Image: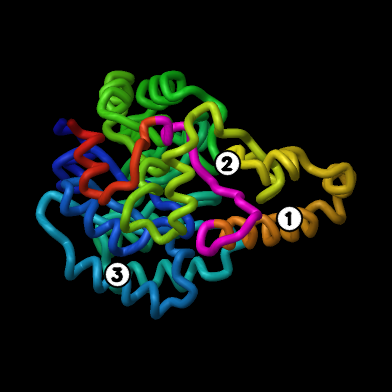
Amino acid sequence: MQTKLTELLHIKYPIIQAPMFLVSNVAMVTEAMKGGIAGCIPALNYRTLEELRSAIKELKANRVEGGSFGFNLIVNKSNVKYKGQLEVICEEGCDFIITSLGSPEETINQAHKVGIKVFCDVVDLKFAKKVEQLGADAIIAVNNQAGGHRGDKTPEDLIKELSTDCSIPIISAGGVGNKGDIDTMLGYGAAGVSVGSPFIASIEAGVTEEYKQACVDYGANDIVMTERISGTPCTVINTPYVQKIGTKQTWLESVLNKNKKLKKWVKMIRFSIGMNATKNAATKATYKTVWVAGPSIEYTKEILPTKEIVNRLVN
């Protein structure tokens, strides 16, 4: 399973353990590295820059041959912590950064100065070409099988389109739950895969046992799109609570979103409310069970150590 991704990150298998809000942590990534893959954590999982700095130092101390680690940065203006997070990551060092939701230009420039590779989330060819021109080292192709905020194109269509028109490696994100899925994505032309949802049900994941067990009990047919979390369609498990509140915007939200002056503020409020609900559901017992996941939980049959999940993916 040697590919351009394994060469870029010096890993045994062409897999990135995807960065997941609230879920990813040092313990998960450490075990992922021991399993011969790369692990990634959202920088926003740390409240302060000192907590982020401490996590990087711990991961550097835990690094093993055949594994690597990185961080995910939200690079648009709405993330007021972005510049500080980038500075700390570049000071302390890591193997790679994954950028999301904005221009990666500053991140690429600063990271490359200190030898950190930069991979960029994209959902279409237009943005893929832009990040390639800016100097990205690889593209994370987010397809319509991804968990959370996903793209519109199928894995096959997106990978083939990007690999035809881009010269840097394509890493497919979404729809991978077993070895067969990995082989399929590589067959389409991907250099590797980014896998998230199957790792939610890991012993090391920083969420409640109820959330982990839901990924065991529910399957691909139980994943629905909702606009009630961030205002942007997002995949969640169709729990009784999600069924109760519905997946569409309320009539008032819909009306306010059409008002140019109020749209920005309505989205900010909806995002704040939705993220708070998601955090509460993921980290403590609550009847408001809004659990983000993708259809690849179909193959999750029990809560396992991260290294065993890696073994299941590669064997």
Q: Nearer the viewer, mark 1 or mark 2?
A: 2
Disc with the residue nearer the chain's start (1 vs 2) = 2
Amino acid found under the numbered disc labelled 2: Val
Cα distance in 3D space between marks 3 and 1: 32 Å
Residue at 39%, 25% in the rendered image: 159
Decide: few, some or many residues near mark 1? Use Cα within 10 Å; few <14, some 14-19, many ≥20.
Answer: some
Which is the main secondary structure of the residues drawn in magenta? loop
Residue 270 left/right relative to 79:
right
Q: Considering depth in this image, is 45 or 283 the residue closer to the camera?
A: 283
Residue at 61%, 41% in the rendered image: 239
Residue named by callout 3 = 56
Q: Considering depth in this image, is 31 or 146 the residue closer to the camera?
A: 31
Quadrant position of the C terminus in the picture: top left
**Image marks 3 and 1: residues in contact by CB distance under 8 Å:** no
Disc with the residue nearer the chain's start (2 vs 3) = 3
Where in the figure is residue 138, as x and y percent of width and height?
33, 41
Amino acid found under the numbered disc labelled 1: Arg
Decide: few, some or many residues near mark 2? Use Cα within 10 Å; few <14, some 14-19, many ≥20.
Answer: many
Q: Nearer the viewer, mark 3 or mark 1?
A: 1
Residue named by callout 1 = 270
| Residue numbers of the magenta segment | 282-298
Q: Nearer the viewer, mark 2 or mark 3?
A: 2
Is 314 placed above or below 231 here? Answer: above
